[in-house]
Amino acid sequence: MQRICGILICAIIFCASGSVAGAQAKVADTVCPSAVPPLKSLGAVTDPTDVVKIADAARGVVRAYADCIVEARSDGAVEPNMHYDEIRAAQYDILLGRALMVQKDYDGAHAAFADARKLSGDVVDWVPQPIGYNMNNKLGSGTVKNSGYTKSQYYDSAADIVKAADTELAKLEPATDKKQAPASPSP
């Protein structure tokens, strides 16, 4: 029941903007413009209980953001563009995973949650490359900029997605029953 409520809440958020035309007119993404058509498709799903359509639309959004991740990486735009794209893909991976859980496609749900965990974990673990330079002074002292204490501007969102993915993965991975665990051989 909690799974259905979770997916319904996510779907209602996407569909709650009143009319489909109004929702589609509001969709914009300047960092990843190729995600706009799939986002509009997701917004066009009028029945929040139709998890098949939600999953199909979410899958399209994830693919669009994955393409933008590749493009941002090739352009060297890790922070903020690639991290933004990773966060957005991870968000829709969570939606996709929840929709697949309701459909009892546990392998697909596991893959979506694992992908969300990986993408958001990359953002959480990221630290900028340190940039060192030497000042031309009598002491010959050096200075290091970005010494590893700066986080992505999307760190907090990424940490929330990591927690959500871990929670959903824990629901899918059953705990080992100690009574049924094989006994270790005695020497």
Image: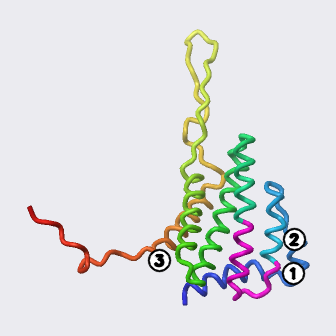
Residue 60 painted magenta: yes
The kind of residue tagged 1 is Val
Please check the rendered image and state whether residue 147 is part of the magenta-colored stretch, yes or no: no
The one of 63 and 127 positioned closer to us in this rendering: 63
Q: Alpha-carbon neighbours of circle 2 within 10 Å: few (<14), some, or many (≥20)?
A: few
> Which residue does the numbered mark 3 point to in the structure image?
171
Residue 148 lies left or right of residue 64; in this view the side is: left
Q: Nearer the viewer, mark 3 or mark 2?
A: 3
Residue found at the very far left of the displayed protein = 187
Label 1 residue SS = helix
From the viewer's perspective, is residue 60 above or below residue 46?
Answer: above
Where residue 183 sits, quadrant-wise, is bottom left
**Position above or below: 128 against 52:** above
Q: Residue at x 69, y 62 (%)?
A: 88
Q: Is residue 157 left or right of residue 34?
A: left
The residue segment tinted magenta is 44-61
The N terminus sits in image quarter:
bottom right
Real-space CA distance between mark 3 and mark 2, rounded to the nearest whole angstrom = 35 Å
Query: Tag 1 or tag 3, which sits nearer the N-term?
Result: 1
First along the sequence among labels 2 and 1 = 1
Q: Earlier in the sequence, mark 3 or mark 2?
A: 2
Q: Secondary structure at mark 2?
A: helix
Reading the image, the residue beneath label 1 is 20
Q: Which residue is mark 2?
A: 26
- Mark 3 touches mark 1? (CB < 8 Å): no
In the foreground, 52 or 3: 52
Type of the residue with mark 3: Lys
Q: State the separation of the CA atoms marked 3 and 1.
A: 33 Å
x then y, percent, for residue 52: 69, 82
